[in-house]
Image: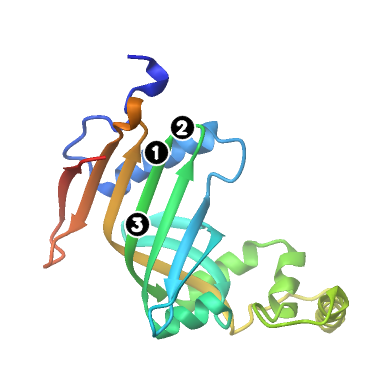
């Protein structure tokens, strides 16, 4: 079989899903041309109406997957109504995909403060200036607010706004997908035990 079309799942039945994700993510960062940390975030409102957008993964460990946003944005409002969400990574070059589902909760203030302090100053000011997901009459509305907050903070430290911070998706389901020849892809599903004692694994038909 052509090496390019050989399923890339590997045979690691005892590897925890976070370890497997770490291996795949390192592979993607080494081979993808741009944004290996980009992931689709799907949320839904209280009526079940879904919405999806691309966000960036800013950290992960065995607690879950972290991203940052304006808590008053559309995604933030939906997560306040319905805490279940899904993530999807698609790495075209390495021909792999990871799908993650679970509940989302805010990270603690200290974690959000630490990440906010690491951002470029322009991004920090943007977090204050952008009333995310709200209508504006034109680009000047945003530029005016950027100028206002630039003047407000001057050369001093830009504090994290209360409406901006991190979310952590705590997964109960993680699926790894690797492309195979003739669409005979390789799929491996991890589901968390009901008592949170570990993970169950199973192979899925493509």
For this rendering, which residue is in front, 24 or 111?
24
Task: Indicate which disc, 3 or 1, sits on the residue closer to the N terminus.
Answer: 1
Q: Is residue 93 visible?
A: yes
The spot of residue 164 in percent (x, y) is 59, 78
Circle nearer the viewer, 3 or 1: 3
- On residue 100, which mark appears? 3
In contact (CB < 8 Å): disc 2 and disc 1 = yes
Name the residue: 48% across, 40% down.
Answer: 91
Q: Label 3's element?
A: strand
- 3D distance between C-alphas at marks 3 and 1: 14 Å
Horizontal arrangement in the rendering, residue 24 relative to residue 127 (left or right)? left
State the quadrant of the C terminus. Answer: top left
The spot of residue 24 in percent (x, y) is 39, 38
- On residue 94, which mark appears? 2
* Dot 3 crowding, Cα within 10 Å, few <14, some 14–19, many 20+: many
Name the residue: 40% across, 43% down.
Answer: 97
Q: Quadrant of residue 187?
A: top left
* Residue assigned mark 1: 24
State the quadrant of the N terminus. Answer: top left
Name the residue: 21% across, 30% down.
Answer: 11
Task: Indicate which disc, 2 or 3, sits on the residue closer to the N terminus.
Answer: 2
């Amino acid at each position: 079989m052509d090496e390019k079309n050989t399923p890339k799942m590997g045979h690691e039945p005892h590897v925890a899903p976070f370890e497997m994700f770490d291996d795949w993510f390192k592979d993607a960062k080494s081979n993808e041309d741009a944004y290996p940390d980009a992931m689709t975030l799907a949320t839904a409102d209280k009526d079940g109406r879904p919405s999806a957008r691309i966000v960036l993964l800013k950290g992960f460990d065995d607690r879950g997957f972290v991203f940052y946003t304006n808590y008053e944005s559309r995604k933030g409002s939906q997560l306040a109504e319905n805490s279940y969400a899904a993530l999807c990574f698609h790495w075209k070059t390495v021909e792999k995909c990871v799908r993650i589902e679970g509940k989302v909760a805010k990270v603690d203030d200290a974690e959000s403060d630490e990440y906010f302090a690491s951002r470029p100053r322009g991004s920090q000011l943007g977090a204050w200036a952008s009333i995310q997901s709200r209508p504006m009459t034109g680009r000047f509305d945003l530029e005016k607010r950027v100028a206002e907050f630039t003047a407000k903070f001057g050369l001093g430290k830009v504090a994290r706004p209360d409406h901006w911070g991190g979310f952590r998706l705590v997964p109960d389901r993680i699926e790894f997908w690797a492309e195979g020849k003739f669409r005979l892809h390789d799929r491996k599903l991890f589901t968390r035990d009901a008592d949170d004692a570990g993970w169950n694994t199973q192979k899925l038909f493509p």
